[in-house]
Image (spheres, rainbow, N blue to C red):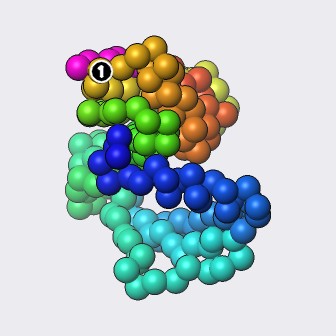
């Protein structure tokens, strides 16, 4: 196994089955947010989801995360009882990094690349003007243009291996979503 914990033969078998009926492997995903009734806090929840037309409902998939803002921002805006929470833009950047990590690991396993280590980091500058009403929503097109993604891969890589790492990033659905909305500038670094 070039990637510990991923069976490349199973990926190959999965791809054969997928080739016979792609629609039966479509992932129907759902996420929701429930405002907690005061301030900026909300409860994010995921699931249920579908595999093709089959609903996947499992008690173990009832994930929740408290979202909101930073205490300092809440205080500046006059939010009573402001506290530190994962901010939604941070959560989306975390999703981008995680999805790119998974896509690279899967592509390396599938193509026999000996990946020894991997870290993906995203940076985005956000002008809060439109969300607080100091600017119009159309101003997002001026201020929210690009996200920087830094991928550091470790291993002894040939040029082909590096191509597979970079192709893996492009296979990430979250990278694709971001890429359709923003200019994603991805920088690759390689180490032994």
- Asked whether residue 46 is drawn in magenta, I would say no
In the image, 19 versus 133, the foreground residue is: 19
Main secondary structure found in the magenta portion:
strand
Residue 180 visible in the picture: yes
Q: Position of residue 109 (x, y in %)?
A: 43, 42
Q: Is residue 161 above or below residue 26?
A: above
The residue labelled by disc 1 is: 156
Q: Residue at x 76, y 61 (%)?
A: 20
Q: Residue at x 36, y 20 (%)?
A: 157
Q: Is residue 4 above or below residue 190?
A: below
Mark 1 surroundings within 10 Å by alpha-carbon count, few (fewer than 14), some (14 through 19), many (20 or more): some
- Asked whether residue 189 is drawn in magenta, I would say yes
Q: Residue at x 38, y 71 (%)?
A: 63
User: Magenta residues, as a range?
Assistant: 186-192
In the image, 64 versus 28, the foreground residue is: 28
In the image, 66 versus 71, the foreground residue is: 66
Q: Position of residue 61 (x, y in %)?
A: 42, 76
Q: Position of residue 103 (x, y in %)?
A: 48, 42
Quarter of image, res 136: top right
């Amino acid at each position: 196994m070039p990637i510990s914990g991923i069976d490349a033969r199973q990926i190959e078998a999965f791809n054969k089955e997928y080739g016979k009926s792609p629609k039966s492997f479509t992932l129907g995903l759902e996420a929701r947010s429930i405002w907690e009734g005061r301030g900026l806090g909300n409860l994010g929840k995921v699931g249920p989801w579908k595999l093709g037309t089959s609903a996947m409902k499992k008690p173990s998939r009832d994930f929740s995360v408290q979202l909101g803002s930073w205490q300092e921002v809440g205080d500046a805006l006059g939010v009573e009882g402001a506290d530190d929470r994962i901010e939604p833009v941070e959560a989306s950047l975390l999703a981008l990094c995680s999805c790119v990590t998974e896509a690279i690991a899967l592509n390396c396993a599938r193509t026999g690349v000996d990946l020894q280590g991997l870290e993906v980091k995203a940076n985005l500058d956000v002008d809060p003007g439109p969300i607080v009403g100091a600017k119009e929503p159309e101003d997002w097109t001026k201020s929210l243009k690009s996200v920087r993604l830094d991928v550091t891969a470790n291993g002894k890589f040939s040029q082909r291996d590096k191509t597979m790492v970079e192709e893996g990033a492009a296979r990430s659905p979250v990278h694709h979503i971001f890429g359709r909305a923003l200019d994603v500038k991805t920088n690759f670094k390689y180490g032994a």
